[in-house]
Amino acid sequence: MTKAVVIVNPTSGKEEGEEYGPEVKRELEKLYSEVELRWTEGEGDATHFAREACSEEVDAIYALGGDGTVNECINGIAPEDYRPPFGFIPLGTVNDLGRVLDIPMNPKKAVEKLTERTKRVIDVGKINDQYFVDIVAIGSIPDAVHEVPIEKKTKLGPLAYVIEGVKAINEKEVYPFKFNVDGEKLNEDSFLVLVALTNSVAGITTMIPEASVDDGYLHLVVVRGDTIAEKINLVPKIFTGNVTDDENVLYRKFSKGSISLKEGYEKEIVTNVDGDEGDSLPIDLEVKKHHMTVFVPDTDNNK
């Protein structure tokens, strides 16, 4: 007898979770003897349900929701010794992990592909005691993006993040960061720091072409840009995949490191982790290489 647990956020996207939950159940019943839907009602529910499913040693865990729901499920699965394969139907705004795994962004098409699947092993990032599968962002742009109204996110999708990010370029404040990446110590003043696990950032899949979800590295991007002109010149490079080659960008790939502020700088700087507010600096970072197994569409079985 086989069992899958499906964790559904009914309010994700345009409340599509409630619509697609029963459809996902019907499709997965073609693969598993038992399929149980567990509906989230608030923050932390998805993590709790995923952790419970691991302790029950179910055969698979699926999520139906946006980046926040996926992140919560990852945080329920990643710390456990028994980690069943994980699949998900993207319903949110950006869905970076879904993009790099070639999961259809159209929920209906993603549901149709549930039974045409294969497995892939992926890395998982860790910031202090929290896990992530997309990005840690620090600085004025992440602060602006965090304030994007949910209505605008739903209507504009990834473009909402880009628009708010461009607006934040006018922000003049830079922060005095200290980095330790695999033992290399660096001091940089910056208005934007990214630590990415994949090549897709805010839905832009060309931003860090060096990155892969299974390469065993985190990818550090530190944007210097002292003037507005220098910052604006970076914008087209974000879309063409040349941002890490720019002279105003520091790029490193690493497996373990830390980010803090120079001594004497008292302002609290909060991180943005997979689109939601994370810990304040200082932070410790590491990558858990090939830590989880995920379901992805079987490209050899397309109909």
Image: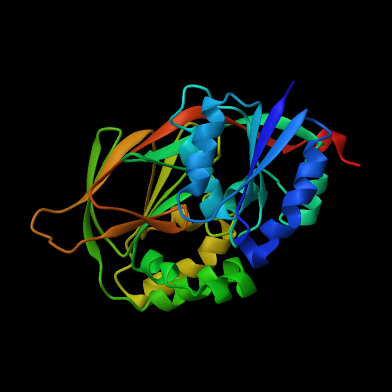
Q: Position of residue 123 (x, y in %)?
A: 51, 33
Q: On the rendered structure, is 108 left or right of 260? A: right
> Residue at left 47%, top 73%?
148
Q: Is 190 above or below relative to 290?
A: below
Q: Position of residue 109 (x, y in %)?
A: 80, 52
Res. 284 image quadrant: top left
Q: Position of residue 122 (x, y in %)?
A: 56, 33
Q: Nearer the viewer, residue 277 or 161?
A: 277
Res. 219 image quadrant: top left
> Residue at left 52%, top 46%?
46
The N terminus is located in which quarter?
top right
The C terminus is located in which quarter?
top right
Q: Is 192 above or below relative to 282?
A: below
Residue 46 visible in the displayed image? yes
The residue furthest right is: 303
Q: Is 82 above or below relative to 250?
A: above
Residue 199 visible in the displayed image? no
Q: On the rendered structure, is 53 left or right of 144? A: right
> Residue at left 76%, top 43%?
25
Q: Nearer the viewer, residue 229 or 255?
A: 255
Q: On the rendered structure, is 76 left or right of 171? A: right
Res. 299 image quadrant: top right
> Residue at left 58%, top 23%?
57
For the rendered model, the colour scheme is rainbow
Q: Position of residue 74 (x, y in %)?
A: 51, 40
Q: Is 182 above or below relative to 63?
A: above
The residue furthest left is: 264
